[in-house]
Image (cartoon, helix red, strand yellow):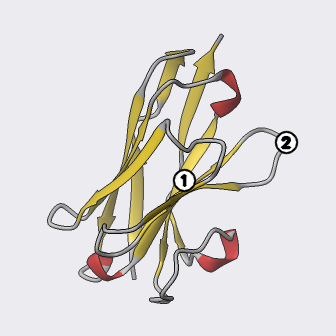
Amino acid sequence: QVQLLESGGGLVQAGGSLRLSCAASGRTFSSYAMGWFRQAPGKQREFVAAIRWSGDTTYYADSVKGRFTISRDNAKNTVYLQMNTLKPENTAVYYCAADSSRFPMLRVGVGSYDYWGQGTQVTVSS
């Protein structure tokens, strides 16, 4: 069982940066792939980024590639999402999630992740 708690959201102007953190409880965190998703009002939850358990492989949605960076510190049981050059359309609730399947490839589907945090609001003003 893994419990996830996001932090770091807030209000930022367009072009600014935020760093989200996701603290995990549980001894098995370091063996799970982790992902970040977001959900804007009236829209479905969508994939943002994922990172392999070892941290050596990452994958990004095209819309954030080059601006967002996912990383993890297994010693601290924490995964991060550094978001740069933020745009108003990035406004959403951001969720971290854990994939306990040990599937060899990073996955982007909401249903592929079995543990979720409560989310943190990110608002980008124009």
Give the x, y percent position of residue 15. Answer: 52, 16
Give the x, y percent position of residue 17. Answer: 43, 25
The residue furthest left is 75
Front residue (pair 98, 119): 98
Callout 1: helix, strand or loop?
strand
Q: Quadrant of residue 55?
A: bottom left
Quickly name the residue at label 2. Answer: 42
The image shows a total of numbered marks equal to 2
Name the quadrant of the N terminus: bottom left
Q: Where residue 95 is drawn, which disc sits there?
A: 1
Q: Is residue 17 visible?
A: yes
Q: Residue at x 52, y 81 (%)?
A: 105
Q: Is residue 118 visible?
A: no
Front residue (pair 22, 104): 104
49 to 114, vertically: above or below: above
Q: Residues within 10 Å of mark 2 (few under 14, many from 20)?
A: few
113 relative to 42 in the view: left or right: left
Determine whether label 1 and label 2 are within 8 Å by CB.
no
Callout 2: helix, strand or loop?
loop
Give the residue type at disc 1: Tyr
